[in-house]
Image (tube, rainbow, N blue to C red):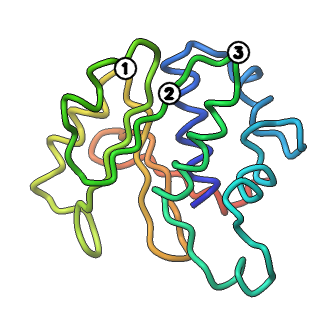
Amino acid sequence: MIRAVQMLIAEGMQRLCGLSSNWVLEYFQETEDAALSLVNICRAGHIGRSLVDSEKRWTSASEVLSICSRLLNKISRLDLKVINETSGCLLPENIAEVDSPTLLIIHNRLGIDQIEQLYLPHLKALMELHQFSGMLGGTPGQAMFLLGYHNDRAIMLDPHYVQV
């Protein structure tokens, strides 16, 4: 799930802050200097302290988003906030004083084995917004980043699929 969350935040940086992809990539490089590198996310969240932990434990989207939110707050030159609403309901007081670009995350289960058909027209409408930065989904051991759709087909990226 860590890589999928990185993809979501990177998309948000481009759409909400207007950063170029080269600028965004600096935050995710696999170095200790890159604020949102895999190493720094794992270190900040105490993820993968042992081989057993890293192989057996599924890190949820809300956990990773919480960690990344803390890391983003430490970057003084980047004005991006994350609201990570885990209750599935957005309350007005949680966004009343938003005064900078904000990546709004609302956790909801949209189905058990697949997305319920009832939600599809609403999800498509959300995906048409310029500010839409993507959706996360998955099951333990498999994370997906849904970026949008074309015709009636979802555009999903699996961060674990290596392309050559």
Kind of residue at badge 1: His
Sequence-earlier tag: 2 or 1: 2
Helix, strand or loop at label 1? It is: loop
Mark number, residue 81: 2
What is the distance, in whole Å, between disc 3 and disc 2 at their CAs? Answer: 12 Å
Instruction: Tell me which residue sits at (56%, 55%) in the image.
Output: 64
- Label drawn at residue 101: none
Question: Which residue in the structure is indicated by mark 3?
Answer: 77
Residue 39: give x, y in percent of width and height. Answer: 81, 54
Q: Name the residue: 25% across, 33% down.
A: 126
**Are dots 3 and 2 in contact, CB under 8 Å?**
no
Q: Earlier in the sequence, mark 3 or mark 1?
A: 3
Q: Position of residue 151 (x, y in %)?
A: 29, 40
Q: Secondary structure at mark 3?
A: loop
- What number is the disc on residue 130? 1
Mark 1 surroundings within 10 Å by alpha-carbon count, few (fewer than 14), some (14 through 19), many (20 or more): few
Q: In the displayed image of the protein, which residue is found farthest to the left? A: 118
- In the image, is residue 92 above or below residue 113? above
Q: Residue at x 78, y 49 (%)?
A: 40
- Is 5 or 116 nearer to us in this picture? 5
